[in-house]
Each structure stands twice: as C-alpha cells, then as structure tokens.
Image (spheres, rainbow, N blue to C red):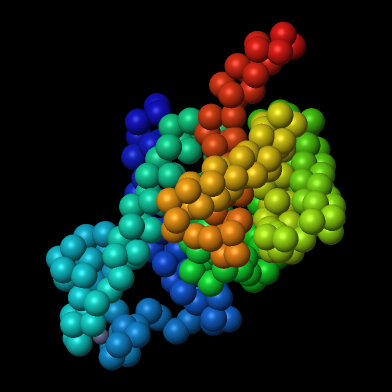
Amino acid sequence: MTLPTVAVAVLLGLLAGSFANVAIVRVPEGGSVVRPRSACPGCDARIAPRDNVPVLSWLWLRGRCRSCAERIPVRYPLVEIGIGVLFGVVAWRVGLDPLLPAWLLFAWTLFVLAVIDLRVRRIPNRLTYPLTPVLLLLVVGGALLGGDPAGALRGVLGGVAAFAALLALALISPRGMGMGDVKLAGFIGVGLGPLGWGEVLLGVFGGFLVGGIVAIALLATGLRTRKDYVPFGPSLAAGALAALLVGEPIIDAYRAAVGM
Ligand SMILES: [Zn+2]
C-alpha cells in the first residue's frame, strides 16, 4: 500500500516542483503564476512542453536554453528533486491519510517560502494570504473525514496560537523577525495542529533552535558577521517540517526523559 503511494507522491512532487520554480521567480516580482506560459528570460522563447519535463529536460539540455544557450540555473532541477523527495517522505510517513493533501500543500509551501526568503529576504503575503485558508480547509476537512474533530479544532487554534506567540515576540524583540515570519508561524500552527500541541510547539520553536545553530555556524566559520541579516524563514520551515516528519519520536523521547 505504501510503496505505490510514495511513488505517486514523488511524481506529483516533481510536477509540483516545476510549478514551484515558477512561483519562486514570479511571486516576489508580483507576476501571475499562471500566465504567461514559461519563457526563457534570455531570449523570450516559449519553453516547449518537451523542454519542461522536471529534472530530465534540464539534464538533456545540459542546463542551457534550446534557442539562445542561456544558462538555466541549477536551482531549477534542485527544487524539482527537493520537492519530489519531500513529497515522497511525507507520503511515506503519513500514508494514505485524509490529511495527506493538507500536509503535501504544507510541505510545498514551506519549501517555496524558504527558497524565496533566501533569494529576496522576505516572505511574500501573496503566498501566505491565499494558502493559509486553503490549508485550513484541507486540515479541518481532512481531520473531520478521519473522525478527529478535536484535531480539526487544534488546526484552527494552533494557527491562532502560533501567530499570536510570534507576534508577541516580534513586538518585544523585532530584530531579525518580520511580519512575514509571524504569518508563516500561523500557517505552521494550522498545519501541525491536528498532530497535537507538542508538534505545534516543536514546529515553531524548533525553528528558533535551527536558526540559532545556523547563526552560530555562520559566525564561527566567518561566513557572516554579527551585523549581517540571516533570513529566518528557512529555519522556521525546517523546524516545521521536522515536527511533521519526526515530531512524534522526539516528543515521545522528551516525555520519557521528563517522566510524563
Ligand atoms: Zn533563451
């Protein structure tokens, strides 16, 4: 049962990765993700369907445009592979659950927002605004379908709580955290809510742990100085994905350690 589910999820992930590449470029620029069809930024040539196959097209074009030979950044196949693998892992962990669609959307959005934050150093409202209500619908619908009304309620409350917690932190200590991060935390709370409050807590504050480790590593290696801005979105996304994929064993180990 699991293997076909995972295989389908990987294929879906490769296609979703292809769409993610469009969103990563166009959303920060304010353009539509649907129109116009993809064209080469170098020569404006339309990209034919045969040159738009995830990963494979980049390989057989050797990373260059068919018409003008302009380089296609390696980011394109990497994003496609990344989301393909991510979808496979989510499907493998979750199985054929009514909440699987919600968590695939969750993973896709976190991946895309992390890449956008790394590129342009902000988390665009144009993704969090429309996708948070869609996620909420999939979470509430999926949890109810799975016979878990408490989980559905936790999706709503988890979003509110995570949003409020980061808003309070951003107001007390605004350094390094923007409103984009606060809205992303709300999104994360919705997605992790059905799993439990432990996962919501782990997902949001795991981001601070990842962010702290990354900051220390960057300072220690001299890649960044104390004055440099390090985007927080990728750390938040990593913490949230960790909570989704391995939150349960982490929380169980913690409970065993403190004797709960
Ligand atoms: Zn071209």
Residue 141 located left or right of residue 9: right
Task: Identify the image quadrant of the N terminus.
Answer: top left
Q: How many marks?
A: 0
Give coordinates of residue 148: x percent, y percent. Answer: 73, 29
Q: Does residue 28 appear in the picture of this structure?
A: yes
- Splitting the image into four quadrants, where does ligand 1 fall? bottom left
Q: Nearer the viewer, residue 214 or 33?
A: 214
Give the residue displayed 72% in from the left and 8% down from the top: 259
Q: Is residue 221 above or below residue 248?
A: below
Q: Residue furthest top?
A: 259
Residue 146 located left or right of residue 106: right
Q: Is residue 102 above or below residue 43?
A: above
The picture quadrant where one finds residue 253 is top right
Give the residue displayed 77% in from the left and 61% down from the top: 174
Residue 37 located left or right of residue 50: right
Q: Nearer the viewer, residue 192 or 223?
A: 223
Task: Identify the image quadrant of the C terminus.
Answer: top right
Give the residue displayed 21% in from the left and 70% down from the top: 63
Give coordinates of residue 257: x percent, y percent. Answer: 65, 12
Give the residue displayed 72% in from the left and 44% down from the top: 189
Q: Does residue 112 appear in the picture of this structure?
A: no
The picture quadrant where one finds residue 252 is top right
Give coordinates of residue 188: x percent, y percent. Answer: 67, 47
Give coordinates of residue 100: x percent, y percent. Answer: 55, 40
